[in-house]
Image (spheres, grey):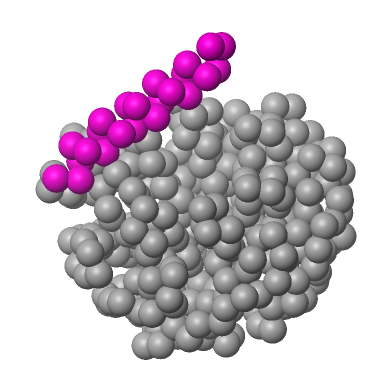
Amino acid sequence: MDNGSMKSILFMATLFVTSVALVRADITYHLLKEIPIGGEGGWDYLSVDSAARRLYVSHASKVVIIDLAKSTVAGEITNTPGVHGVALAPELHRGLVTCGRESKAALVDLTTLQILSKTETGANPDGMLFEPGHQEFYTFNGRGESATVIDAKSGKVVATIPLGGKPEFAVVDVSANLVFNNLEDKNELVAIDTGKHTVVHRWPISPGEEASGLAFDETHHHLFLGCGNKLMAMMDSASGKVLATVPIGDGVDANAFDPGTQLAFASCGDGTTTIARAAGDTLTVVQTLQTERGSRTMTIDPATHNIYLAAATFEAPVAGQRRGKMAPGSFKILVYGMEK
């Protein structure tokens, strides 16, 4: 057995042991630290590679990589205009960045952080994921109302899937050979067959509306949807039935699920993150975490159970503005967790 395999086994064993303990513990999240990034421009998706201790943060026209062991910026992926985020395939040392302004996706070497190739997608690629069963990347194209499927090794387009609505976050169920995706403007969730590259289910999300964020509990077959009408919905991934809902804040964007603690998270632009416990077919709010206004995007590290949110300081708005300008150099990552 090589060193890489041994490290992977030890990592998973540690994750399992801590998960068993934490699922029974009382949970209270609080701010652990802030990681300054600086610069100007907005942000969108965050992605974490637990084993490599790396956090990938979309920022303006680039992806910033943070070394989580040192809490410092470790590198950048540049030349990604209109970047929304990056899907990670660590086992292939590949990533795929969605470049919204170009309507292209950039295939990246995660070791060198260099772009290997760019591929045309549908208009305004936004969300993205890696589907390990077929080793394919998916981009979810906002204006194109479609998904583009790209071979993770060659960077070539495999299929284009019409979705019939504006896609947002997506997740993959490897065992069921399905990719799930929110259609924000249709109040639907679609299921895509990863072998046939076709939509096989369209499920209404009522009483939820305008879902953006999406997370998945593979063990219990539960999907967690962050809905624009201030609800987080838990849906059965086999039947499409909405099992439970809980109230959340205003302006939700991202959702996350921690299999170790059975907690679901919904991060909202009003400066709150709702934390709810899933038990059977029930969902119960256990904490409303105060974050910072505008901190609507989030990811989770299942190894440490920490969540990461993007934030910045904004100046007071002037007449006619919804919010003020972003203060130069104020962009940062907020780290919340259960550590003392």
Q: Is residue 225 visible?
A: no
The front one of 139 and 75 is: 139
Report if residue 17 lies within the magenta region: yes
Image position, residue 128 (x, y; %): 65, 57
Identify which residue is drawn at 69% across, 78% down: 163
The picture places residue 69, in percent across and down from the top left corner, at 44, 25
As for residue 225 lying within the magenta part, the answer is no
Q: Nearer the viewer, residue 107 or 44?
A: 107
Foreground residue among 160 and 45? 160
Figure check: 202 above or below 220: below
Q: Main secondary structure of the magenta part?
A: helix
Residue 127 showing in the rendered view = yes
Q: Please tell me whether residue 246 is drawn above or below residue 24 in the rendered image.
A: below
The region drawn magenta spans 1-24
User: From what the image shows, is residue 18 above or below residue 137?
Assistant: above
Q: Residue at x 20, y 45 (%)?
A: 23
Q: In the visual, does 287 lie left or right of 102?
A: left
The quadrant holding residue 244 is: bottom left
Q: Locate residue 210, reporting x and y percent.
A: 50, 82
Q: Residue at x 78, y 49 (%)?
A: 151
- Residue 290 lies left or right of residue 242; in this view the side is left
Q: Is residue 261 left or right of residue 3?
A: left
- The residue that appears at 54% across and 46% down in the rendered structure is 47
Q: Position of residue 76 (x, y in %)?
A: 68, 36
User: Which quadrant of the view contains residue 279?
Assistant: bottom left
Q: Quadrant of the C terminus?
A: top left
Is 39 left or right of 116, judged from the image as shown?
left
Q: How many marks?
A: 0
